Amino acid sequence: MMFIDAHCHINGLDPEERNNIASTRRSGYIFIDSSINFQSTLNSLQLSDKYPYIYSAIGFHPFSVKEFNESTISDYEKVLHQNKKIVAIGEIGLDETAKTSHEAQEKILKVFFQLAKNVNLPVLIHNRLKEPEIFDILDDFFTSYEKVVFHCFSYDYGMLQRITERGGYVSFSLNILRKKKDIIDSLIKCPLENILLETDSPYMKIDGHASSPLDIEAVYSFAAAIKNLKLQELKEAVCSNANKVFSFK
């Protein structure tokens, strides 16, 4: 059974480390390589084209809003028709720390939600807002959350319950190792049929150091211990969920 990293950024690593991760045969891993703008999308597609254990999620981070132009969506539509290993649209979302207006972020998020619906792909949500406004926008596009993944889940059980009761997925990251009470409580209570695991590397720092997609084993081991599960049992659950939401080919 595979270790599946449901959200990492191999395309964001420096060239030497990117080559080290990608070029070494990883028989026990699958990586969902997520992009944050069109250039990182192209970088990711080069990786997933070349390596069988890397898949691409193509997105547009709220920090990238100023890069959006009239050709952006047509550029994404073009690569979607050319590449069979694109398994999600993301990461996309809202971030109160972005240096662009909330209105601009929301407008672009809606455009990418519509793109995801048009091509029948799941969405990987980046949500850094204190208010649960993201649900109002989601509900305009999705009657259920079966194709919705909240990546790097960092919220309390109330938020988790609102997602899982609609059939959505929550992806816990390396930040569970920091043992913040709300996140750990959500991890404990998260139903197995709604859980995914990720590193969000290299952007998720642990003990002040950049992380690697290979740190996914530490996420699985910690999560299994917290949920009082055997590692194999957790791997089977995550693998089943990942196959449902990403429809690996």
Image (spheres, grey):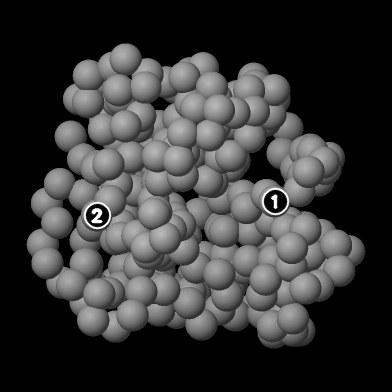
Residue 8, image x and y in percent? 40, 58
Residue 217, image x and y in percent? 24, 43
Q: Which secondary structure, mark 2?
A: helix
- Please give the count of numbered marks on the rendered protein: 2
Question: Mark 2 and mark 1: span between their CA atoms?
Answer: 25 Å
Seen at 59% across and 28% down, the residue is: 182
Seen at 40% across and 39% down, the residue is: 177
Q: Which secondary structure, mark 1?
A: strand
Numbered tag placed on residue 214 in the rendering = 2
Q: Amino acid at mark 1?
A: Arg
**Quarter containing the N terminus:** top left
Numbered tag placed on residue 225 in the rendering = none
Which residue is tagged 1? 128
Please say if 69 is above or below 154.
below
Identify which residue, 27 or 130, lies in the foreground. Answer: 130
Residue 50, image x and y in percent? 23, 73
Identify which residue, 114 or 27, lies in the foreground. Answer: 27
Are the residues tagged 2 and 1 within 8 Å (C-beta)?
Answer: no
Within-10-Å neighbours for mark 2: few <14, some 14–19, many 20+:
some
Please say if 193 is above or below 153.
above
Within-10-Å neighbours for mark 1: few <14, some 14–19, many 20+:
some
Seen at 66% across and 75% down, the residue is: 64
- Is 216 left or right of 244, judged from the image as shown? left
